Image: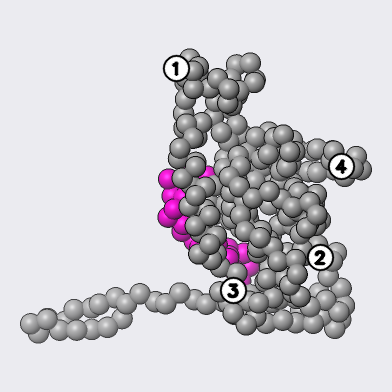
């Protein structure tokens, strides 16, 4: 805050505070029991999310990225911007950034939630592109292996059978093309995202579901996962220019698709033929 005078009348000029920059360090877990005693349950939840990993994967010898200041609101550590103007015309958007293995949920361009993911491994990658929420199931049996149960499954590529669901987060891309989520995150998206709308015969999409924008490329050749870089550069995981341009092309495609807007089936029979 700064005080100036105009014609001997004091005027208070408010100065915008610079954004707080979160800093991080790497810590080697020399004793898992000591680690468990130092951090609370909520603090460990933040640490696990930042490392895209679950508690069962952490043990003595693990090297973890840890914030220098721990706040138990995960959004405080978001790699996604709090506001993203280029999607502010879309009611709900799911962003899945494969480079940094994270999802972000937006409502009219405002970030409401983010979290870790594990996308497709190198041999079975998750396809990038503009996709849409289709059908969902609270419990789905994997078509790859019948012993794999997928809670809170939400499909976004119908014919390919690709969607999001809960499954173990190992700290790297490991799936068979689907996008793995933490249980709480999978349930949240299951309840939050909107399904497609079909015609009365259940054969034609008359309105797309929530857009799932999948973008970026994970560097499988790198020695360390990308979040390790945050220890030396707090902005290392921010969306880059290329990723933002990719999102812009997705938004352009979204706006050109009439199925993203309310359509009366009886008035659009010609439009829907062949879709």
Task: Answer with mark 2 or mark 3, whichever residue precedes in sequence.
Answer: 2
Image location of residue 163, percent across then percent down: 71, 43
Badge 2 vs badge 4, beta-carbon distance below 8 Å: no
Image location of residue 66, percent across then percent down: 69, 77
Residue 73 falls in image quadrant: bottom right
Task: Answer with mark 1 or mark 3, whichever residue precedes in sequence.
Answer: 3
Quadrant for the N terminus, please: bottom left
- Residue 187 vs 62, above or below: the answer is above
Residue 40 falls in image quadrant: bottom right
Q: CA distance from mark 2 to mark 3?
A: 25 Å
Q: Residues within 10 Å of mark 3 (few under 14, many from 20)?
A: some
Which residue, given by chain and number where applicable, does mark 4 sit on?
Answer: 144
Q: Which mark is residue 55?
A: 2
Q: CA distance from mark 2 to mark 4?
A: 26 Å
Q: Is residue 91 visible?
A: no
State the residue at coordinates (56%, 68%).
238
State the residue at coordinates (46%, 28%).
262
Which residue, given by chain and number where applicable, does mark 3 sit on?
Answer: 236
Q: CA distance from mark 1 to mark 3?
A: 49 Å
Magenta stretch: give its range.
71-92
Which residue, given by chain and number where applicable, does mark 1 sit on?
Answer: 267
């Amino acid at each position: 805050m700064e005080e100036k005078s105009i014609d001997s009348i004091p005027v208070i000029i408010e100065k915008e505070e610079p954004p707080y920059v979160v800093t991080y360090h790497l810590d080697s877990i020399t004793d898992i029991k000591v680690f468990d005693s130092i951090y609370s349950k909520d603090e460990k939840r933040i640490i696990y999310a930042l490392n895209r990993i679950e508690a069962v994967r952490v043990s003595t010898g693990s090297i973890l990225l840890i914030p220098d200041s721990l706040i138990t609101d995960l959004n405080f550590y978001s790699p996604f911007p709090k506001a993203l103007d280029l999607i502010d015309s879309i009611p709900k958007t799911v962003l899945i950034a494969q480079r940094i293995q994270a999802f972000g949920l937006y409502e009219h361009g405002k970030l409401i939630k983010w979290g870790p993911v594990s996308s497709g491994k190198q041999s079975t990658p998750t396809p990038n592109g503009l996709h849409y929420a289709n059908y969902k199931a609270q419990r789905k049996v994997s078509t790859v292996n019948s012993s794999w149960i997928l809670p809170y499954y939400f499909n976004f590529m119908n014919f390919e059978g690709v969607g999001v669901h809960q499954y173990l987060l190992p700290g790297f891309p490991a799936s068979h093309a689907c996008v793995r989520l933490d249980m709480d995150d999978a349930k949240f998206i299951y309840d939050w995202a909107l399904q497609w709308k079909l015609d009365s015969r259940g054969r034609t999409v008359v309105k797309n579901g929530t857009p799932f924008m999948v973008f970026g490329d994970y560097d499988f050749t790198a020695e360390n996962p990308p979040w390790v870089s945050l220890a030396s550069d707090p902005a290392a995981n921010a969306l880059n220019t290329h990723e933002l341009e990719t999102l812009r092309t997705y938004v352009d495609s979204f706006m050109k698709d009439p199925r993203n807007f309310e359509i009366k089936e009886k008035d659009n029979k010609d439009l829907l033929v062949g879709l």
